[in-house]
Amino acid sequence: MLSHLAAGDVEPVSYSIRNAADLGAAIQDARHEAGLTQAVLAERAGVSRPYLAQVERGRTSRLLDLVLDLLRVLDLELVVRRRGDRGA
């Protein structure tokens, strides 16, 4: 789960994104932490709720799959963390 640092925490939570399911899990965890429904987040992001549900389940566009494949081939890592978390 993505979370704010509590007193005494050493490093922020981050996600290493290796596939669409990892990205979906990070988005879903952050949405839950923010107390948002899929409908509210989708509206704020300008997408439909069914599309957001697909993203959270790891069913995304071919473009994302291509980007993740390119990162893998180049031995690069995509990391998702809260803005302001610089320790990871």
Image (spheres, grey):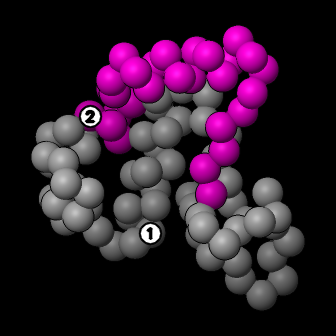
The residue depicted at 33 percent of the width and 23 percent of the height is 61
Q: Is residue 86 depicted above or below 71 in this figure? A: below
The residue depicted at 40 percent of the width and 52 percent of the height is 28
Q: Is residue 65 depicted above or below 23 in this figure? A: above
Q: Amino acid type of disc 1?
A: Glu
User: Is residue 37 among the parts visible in the rendering?
Assistant: no
Which residue appears farthest toward the bottom when viewing the image?
7
Q: Residues within 10 Å of mark 1 (few under 14, many from 20)?
A: few
Element marked by disc 2? helix
Label 1, on which residue?
A: 33
Upstream in sequence: badge 2 or badge 1: 1
Q: Is residue 63 magenta?
A: yes
Say whether residue 36 is left or right of residue 71. left
Say whether residue 57 is left or right of residue 82. left
The residue depicted at 66 percent of the width and 44 percent of the height is 79
Q: Is residue 45 magenta?
A: no
Label 2, on which residue?
A: 54
Which of the 4 quarters of the picture holds residue 40? bottom left
Q: Amino acid type of disc 2?
A: Gln
Which of the 4 quarters of the picture holds residue 82? bottom right
The percent coordinates of residue 7 (x first, y second) are 77, 87
Q: Provide the residue span drawn in magenta.
A: 54-81
> Which quadrant is home to the N terminus?
bottom right
